[in-house]
Image (spheres, rainbow, N blue to C red):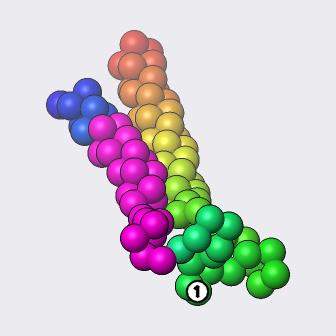
């Protein structure tokens, strides 16, 4: 049962990680030549270096950082719980032998 839950948690985490990066790549496509753009001209509403802002690339790392922190906290919690459980079992065995 434990292995199944670990596999389920790992596969869910990987699904969220890969899905978020795949969804970040689905921004609106660039306008084609049929929309009246000439080579070297910018689409309407586009801001370049003159606007003082960077172009939107479709990547947002904040959700990925939060997921990573949550997984880290979960891992630390599971390790601490396993060590406590092991220490309690060790005490029980030593008390039974003595």
Observer able to see residue 62: no
- The quarter in which the C terminus is drawn is top left
Q: Looking at the picture, tell me which residue is in the foreground, 4 or 38.
A: 38
Q: Is residue 21 above or below residue 48?
A: above
Q: What predominant SS class does the magenta segment belong to?
A: helix
Image-quadrant location for residue 47: bottom right
Say which residue label 1 marks. 45
Name the side, left or right, on which 75 lies relative to 10.
Answer: right
Q: Where's residue 20, x and y in %? A: 41, 55
The residue under the point 62% across, 65% down is 39
Observer able to see residue 8: yes
Please check the rendered image and state whether residue 22 is part of the magenta-colored stretch, yes or no.
yes
Q: Where's residue 16, x and y in %? A: 36, 51
Find the magenta span and give its range: 10-36
The residue under the point 39% across, 19% down is 93
Q: Where's residue 95, x and y in %? A: 42, 23
Q: Looking at the picture, tell me which residue is in the foreground, 25 or 50.
A: 50
What element does badge 1 sit on? Answer: loop
Please check the rendered image and state whether residue 64 is part of the magenta-colored stretch, yes or no.
no
Q: Residues within 10 Å of mark 1 (few under 14, many from 20)?
A: few
The residue under the point 30% across, 38% down is 11
Name the side, left or right, on which 51 lies relative to 32.
Answer: right
Q: Where's residue 3, x and y in %? A: 26, 27
The residue under the point 43% across, 66% down is 32
- The quarter in which the N terminus is drawn is top left
């Amino acid at each position: 049962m434990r292995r199944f839950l670990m596999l389920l948690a790992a596969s869910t985490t990987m699904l969220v990680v890969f899905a978020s990066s795949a969804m970040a790549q689905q921004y609106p496509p660039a306008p084609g030549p049929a929309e009246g753009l000439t080579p070297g001209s910018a689409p309407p509403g586009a801001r370049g270096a003159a606007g003082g802002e960077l172009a939107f690339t479709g990547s947002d790392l904040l959700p990925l950082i939060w997921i990573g922190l949550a997984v880290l906290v979960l891992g630390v919690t599971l390790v601490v719980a396993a060590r406590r459980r092991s220490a309690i079992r060790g005490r029980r065995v030593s008390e039974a032998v003595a």
